[in-house]
Image (cartoon, rainbow, N blue to C red):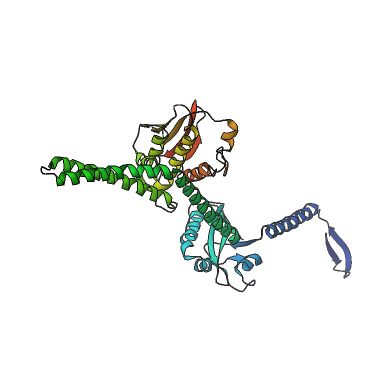
Amino acid sequence: MTITPVQDLDARKLKEFIIISYDITEKKAGEEKLKLLIERLEYVLKGIDAGVWDWVDVSQKFVYWSPKTYELFGYETGEISPSKEFVEKEVHPDDLYLLRQMFYDIIKKKMTPYRGELRLRVKSGEYRWFQTHTFLVTDNNNNAKRLLGSLIDIHEIKKMESNLVEETKKTIQSSKLASIGEIAAGVAHEVNNPLTIIFGFIRMIEEELNSEQMNHETVVQAIETIKQAASRAAKIITGLRDFSRDGARDPFEEVRVTEVLDMALTLCRERFKINEVELKLDLRTQKFITCRRVELSQVFLNLIMNAFDAVKDSESPWIQVTTQEVPDYIEVSVTDSGQSISQETVDKMFQPFYTTKRFGSGTGLGLSIAKNIMANHRGEIFYDPSSKNTRFTVRLPRDFII
């Protein structure tokens, strides 16, 4: 409401009032809504324990920090002058490129909203992990104008993730060692065979050397046989050594899929012979794949040994390993003479610690670990229900680029 007095200039006295009234019901309602929205935002920020920052104009140095943002860095409100330069100075050296990439992606490529994680140094000198959500505001010409974001301390979460990763690695390694224990007897026979050949031909050479008429050709052939047997034994030992170590940090490399398969088969061929399980190889492709060979050989060995355990006591057991090319992928399938698996088992088989083997015969981690390894290779492992026999397939992308 506005009240305006009107004077009679001749009589020099108040003549009348002009009263103008406005309906501000909507304005008041709008103010209440804005107040409620601000309160709601404040409660949300308190609930998620987040700080807020605002780079009002990306062409200027001014950056606003909420009191909570100062607190996350360990400072009193206003104790420092926030700026892009300050954040670049306090970011962990290993994460500086991530910060610059973030600004480039948002400002130049207009990627918004944008979420990132990086380590920043707080007042105590400690580097802590933070997660930031950033939003871009553009002008009428779609040029970057303003950046706003939230900051959340996720340091404890990252520590727990790191601990979980380490425990997972230990579990994987324990599972591998357990597998090695299961195949140890077969490996011992596998190594013993070439050693028997070596010693046998050494004795033959000794006899030839002691004879009056040494057969030179016989000695040369014996030496060549010894070389092949020694090479076979060395290959077995190397495969066992490689398989027993942690290959999670190995670089990805290009290798023929059949070489990785052979690494796994080397450790179990003799066991197949001892138990009279027929091994069939249908290698339709020997193309190169990009992988961590130790990890991938663990996947293949797990599938092969699972198939072996399932059929070794059956009548006329066999296992077939197939490699083939399909659009965009290389597939490796392991099929055994057993019948298909029940749906209940299929639903649970990739869960950690689930096993259908008798107590003490398996950890129940093999397929779960294999699934994680294949995810790291941007591939997949799955049970094929279309086969009348039990079949598992590993699928690797042909254009996998590191």
208 or 73: nearer the viewer: 208
Residue 15 location in percent, x, y?
A: 89, 64
* Quadrant in the rendering for residue 83: bottom right
The residue located at (45%, 52%) in the rendering is: 248
Q: Total of numbered circles in the picture?
A: 0
> Of all residues shown, which one is farthest toward the left?
213
> Of all residues shown, which one is farthest toward the top?
388
The residue located at (46%, 60%) in the rendering is: 97
**Would you place residue 272 above or below residue 243 in this image?**
above
Residue 162 location in percent, x, y?
A: 54, 57
Residue 107 location in percent, x, y?
A: 50, 56
Left or right: 390 with respect to 78?
left
Q: Quadrant of the N terminus?
A: bottom right
260 or 338: nearer the viewer: 338
**Would you place residue 356 above or below residue 167 in this image?**
above
Residue 112 location in percent, x, y?
A: 55, 51
**Would you place residue 174 above or below residue 77 in this image?**
above
313 or 78: nearer the viewer: 313
- Is residue 179 visible in the rendered structure shown here? yes
- Is residue 138 visible in the rendered structure shown here? no
